Amino acid sequence: MKINRFLFPLLFILLVLSCGQSRGDGRAKTVGDKAESALIAGAEVVSDTSFDAEEEEFDLFLQKFSEQRSFQLNRVKFPINVTVPDTDDEGMAPIEETIGRYEWEMLDFTYDSTFLTRPYDQYYQVVRFQNDTAVVEIRGINNGIYADYYFELIDNRWYLVTLCEASF
Protein backbone atom coordinates (compact mmCIF):
# COMPACT_ATOMS: atom_id res chain seq x y z
CA MET A 1 0.00 0.00 0.00
CA LYS A 2 2.83 2.40 0.87
CA ILE A 3 4.57 1.45 -2.38
CA ASN A 4 1.50 2.38 -4.44
CA ARG A 5 1.31 5.78 -2.72
CA PHE A 6 4.87 6.61 -3.84
CA LEU A 7 4.87 4.79 -7.16
CA PHE A 8 1.84 6.50 -8.75
CA PRO A 9 2.97 10.09 -8.00
CA LEU A 10 6.47 9.23 -9.25
CA LEU A 11 5.10 7.86 -12.53
CA PHE A 12 2.84 10.91 -12.90
CA ILE A 13 5.82 13.28 -12.43
CA LEU A 14 7.89 11.34 -15.01
CA LEU A 15 4.99 11.51 -17.47
CA VAL A 16 4.63 15.27 -17.03
CA LEU A 17 8.38 15.84 -17.39
CA SER A 18 8.66 13.72 -20.54
CA CYS A 19 5.70 15.48 -22.17
CA GLY A 20 7.08 18.87 -21.23
CA GLN A 21 10.35 18.20 -23.06
CA SER A 22 8.71 17.48 -26.42
CA ARG A 23 8.10 20.39 -28.79
CA GLY A 24 4.66 21.73 -28.14
CA ASP A 25 4.65 24.79 -30.41
CA GLY A 26 3.49 22.83 -33.47
CA ARG A 27 6.22 24.05 -35.83
CA ALA A 28 8.15 21.65 -38.04
CA LYS A 29 11.67 20.63 -37.20
CA THR A 30 14.34 22.73 -38.90
CA VAL A 31 17.68 21.56 -40.29
CA GLY A 32 19.28 22.60 -37.01
CA ASP A 33 16.79 20.52 -35.05
CA LYS A 34 17.47 17.54 -37.31
CA ALA A 35 21.20 17.96 -36.86
CA GLU A 36 20.76 18.17 -33.09
CA SER A 37 18.61 15.03 -33.10
CA ALA A 38 21.11 13.23 -35.31
CA LEU A 39 24.01 14.18 -33.08
CA ILE A 40 22.14 12.82 -30.09
CA ALA A 41 21.48 9.60 -32.01
CA GLY A 42 25.14 9.40 -33.10
CA ALA A 43 24.49 10.05 -36.79
CA GLU A 44 26.31 12.54 -38.97
CA VAL A 45 24.44 15.23 -40.88
CA VAL A 46 26.10 16.77 -43.91
CA SER A 47 24.61 19.81 -45.56
CA ASP A 48 24.54 19.80 -49.37
CA THR A 49 25.83 23.37 -49.43
CA SER A 50 29.00 22.47 -47.55
CA PHE A 51 30.45 20.84 -50.68
CA ASP A 52 29.72 23.83 -52.87
CA ALA A 53 31.37 26.29 -50.50
CA GLU A 54 34.92 25.01 -50.76
CA GLU A 55 37.07 23.07 -53.18
CA GLU A 56 37.26 19.32 -52.65
CA GLU A 57 40.70 18.12 -51.54
CA PHE A 58 42.15 15.84 -54.22
CA ASP A 59 43.85 13.34 -51.88
CA LEU A 60 40.64 12.67 -49.97
CA PHE A 61 38.69 12.48 -53.22
CA LEU A 62 41.15 9.96 -54.72
CA GLN A 63 40.99 7.77 -51.62
CA LYS A 64 37.18 7.68 -51.69
CA PHE A 65 37.24 7.23 -55.49
CA SER A 66 39.40 4.11 -55.05
CA GLU A 67 37.37 2.59 -52.22
CA GLN A 68 33.70 3.17 -53.12
CA ARG A 69 32.26 1.88 -56.38
CA SER A 70 29.13 4.04 -56.26
CA PHE A 71 31.20 7.16 -55.61
CA GLN A 72 33.49 6.28 -58.51
CA LEU A 73 30.58 5.75 -60.89
CA ASN A 74 29.20 9.17 -59.95
CA ARG A 75 32.55 10.89 -60.46
CA VAL A 76 33.39 9.59 -63.95
CA LYS A 77 32.05 11.70 -66.81
CA PHE A 78 30.25 9.02 -68.85
CA PRO A 79 30.49 8.20 -71.65
CA ILE A 80 34.22 8.60 -71.26
CA ASN A 81 36.65 8.69 -74.19
CA VAL A 82 39.80 6.67 -73.55
CA THR A 83 42.99 5.92 -75.44
CA VAL A 84 44.04 2.27 -75.21
CA PRO A 85 46.33 -0.07 -77.16
CA ASP A 86 44.66 -1.92 -80.03
CA THR A 87 45.09 -5.57 -79.11
CA ASP A 88 44.17 -6.60 -82.67
CA ASP A 89 47.07 -4.59 -84.11
CA GLU A 90 50.48 -6.27 -84.03
CA GLY A 91 52.20 -3.07 -82.92
CA MET A 92 49.39 -2.32 -80.43
CA ALA A 93 48.86 1.14 -81.90
CA PRO A 94 46.75 3.38 -79.66
CA ILE A 95 43.07 3.72 -80.54
CA GLU A 96 40.27 5.79 -79.04
CA GLU A 97 37.30 4.05 -77.48
CA THR A 98 34.23 5.19 -75.61
CA ILE A 99 33.33 3.44 -72.38
CA GLY A 100 29.82 3.60 -70.94
CA ARG A 101 28.73 3.29 -67.35
CA TYR A 102 27.93 -0.44 -67.64
CA GLU A 103 31.29 -1.40 -69.19
CA TRP A 104 33.27 0.48 -66.53
CA GLU A 105 35.80 -1.45 -64.45
CA MET A 106 36.63 -0.14 -60.99
CA LEU A 107 39.94 1.75 -60.73
CA ASP A 108 42.11 1.60 -57.62
CA PHE A 109 44.65 4.37 -57.02
CA THR A 110 45.74 3.26 -53.55
CA TYR A 111 49.51 3.28 -53.53
CA ASP A 112 52.25 2.54 -51.07
CA SER A 113 56.01 2.43 -51.38
CA THR A 114 56.14 -1.39 -51.63
CA PHE A 115 54.80 -1.14 -55.19
CA LEU A 116 58.15 0.36 -56.14
CA THR A 117 60.22 -2.48 -54.64
CA ARG A 118 58.13 -5.61 -55.15
CA PRO A 119 59.62 -8.31 -57.40
CA TYR A 120 57.03 -8.09 -60.22
CA ASP A 121 54.99 -5.26 -61.74
CA GLN A 122 56.96 -2.50 -60.06
CA TYR A 123 55.61 0.97 -60.66
CA TYR A 124 55.41 4.42 -59.20
CA GLN A 125 52.50 6.82 -59.10
CA VAL A 126 52.71 10.61 -59.29
CA VAL A 127 49.97 13.25 -59.23
CA ARG A 128 50.62 16.41 -61.24
CA PHE A 129 48.45 19.51 -60.82
CA GLN A 130 47.88 22.37 -63.23
CA ASN A 131 45.12 24.94 -62.68
CA ASP A 132 41.87 22.97 -62.27
CA THR A 133 43.24 19.65 -63.52
CA ALA A 134 45.12 16.77 -61.98
CA VAL A 135 46.85 13.94 -63.79
CA VAL A 136 47.60 10.67 -62.03
CA GLU A 137 50.61 9.20 -63.81
CA ILE A 138 51.43 5.53 -63.35
CA ARG A 139 54.80 4.42 -64.70
CA GLY A 140 56.18 0.92 -64.57
CA ILE A 141 59.83 0.11 -64.05
CA ASN A 142 61.07 -1.98 -66.99
CA ASN A 143 57.70 -3.65 -67.45
CA GLY A 144 55.62 -1.60 -69.91
CA ILE A 145 53.11 -0.13 -67.44
CA TYR A 146 52.18 3.37 -68.62
CA ALA A 147 48.91 5.16 -67.86
CA ASP A 148 47.61 8.70 -67.35
CA TYR A 149 44.28 9.51 -65.71
CA TYR A 150 42.96 13.05 -66.20
CA PHE A 151 40.76 14.66 -63.55
CA GLU A 152 39.06 18.06 -63.73
CA LEU A 153 37.67 20.23 -60.96
CA ILE A 154 34.06 20.98 -61.96
CA ASP A 155 31.89 22.97 -59.52
CA ASN A 156 34.48 22.37 -56.77
CA ARG A 157 34.31 18.57 -57.22
CA TRP A 158 36.83 16.30 -58.93
CA TYR A 159 35.77 14.16 -61.91
CA LEU A 160 37.65 11.68 -64.10
CA VAL A 161 37.23 13.04 -67.63
CA THR A 162 39.54 10.87 -69.74
CA LEU A 163 42.37 8.37 -69.52
CA CYS A 164 45.25 7.18 -71.64
CA GLU A 165 46.31 3.59 -71.09
CA ALA A 166 49.41 2.83 -73.14
CA SER A 167 50.67 -0.24 -71.27
CA PHE A 168 51.74 -3.23 -73.32
Image (cartoon, grey):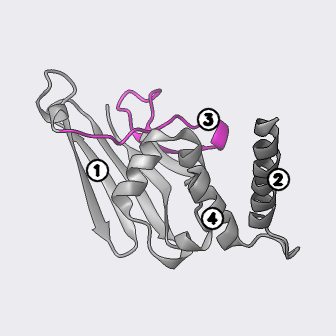
Q: Are marks 4 and 1 in contact (CB under 8 Å)?
A: no
Please report whichever mark, 2 or 4, sits nearer to the chain's N-terminal start. Answer: 2
Q: Crowding near pointer 3: few (<14 within 10 Å), some, many (20+)?
A: few
Q: Which residue bears the numbered disc 3?
A: 103
| Discs 2/1, front | 2
Q: Nearer the viewer, residue 127 or 38?
A: 38
- The stretch of residues the image draws in magenta is 85-112
Q: Residue at x 53, y 34 (%)?
A: 105
**Label 4 to label 3: alpha-carbon separation:** 39 Å
- Residue 150 visible: yes
Q: Residue at x 32, y 40 (%)?
A: 110
Task: Give how far across and how far down residue 23 sits, in percent.
Answer: 79, 69
Q: Are marks 4 and 3 in contact (CB under 8 Å)?
A: no
Q: Which residue bears the numbered disc 4?
A: 35
Q: Residue furthest front?
A: 2
Q: Amino acid at mark 4?
A: Ala
Q: Are marks 3 and 1 in contact (CB under 8 Å)?
A: no
Please report whichever mark, 3 or 1, sits nearer to the chain's N-terminal start. Answer: 3
Secondary structure found at label 2: helix
Secondary structure found at label 4: helix
Q: Does the magenta segment cover residue 106?
A: yes
Q: Are marks 2 and 4 in contact (CB under 8 Å)?
A: no
Above or below 37: residue 146: above
Q: Crowding near pointer 4: few (<14 within 10 Å), some, many (20+)?
A: some
Answer left or right for 102 relative to 11: left
Q: Which residue bears the numbered disc 2?
A: 12
Q: Which residue bears the numbered disc 1?
A: 137
Q: Does the magenta segment cover residue 138?
A: no
* Magenta stretch, overall SS: loop
**Label 3 to label 1: alpha-carbon separation:** 23 Å
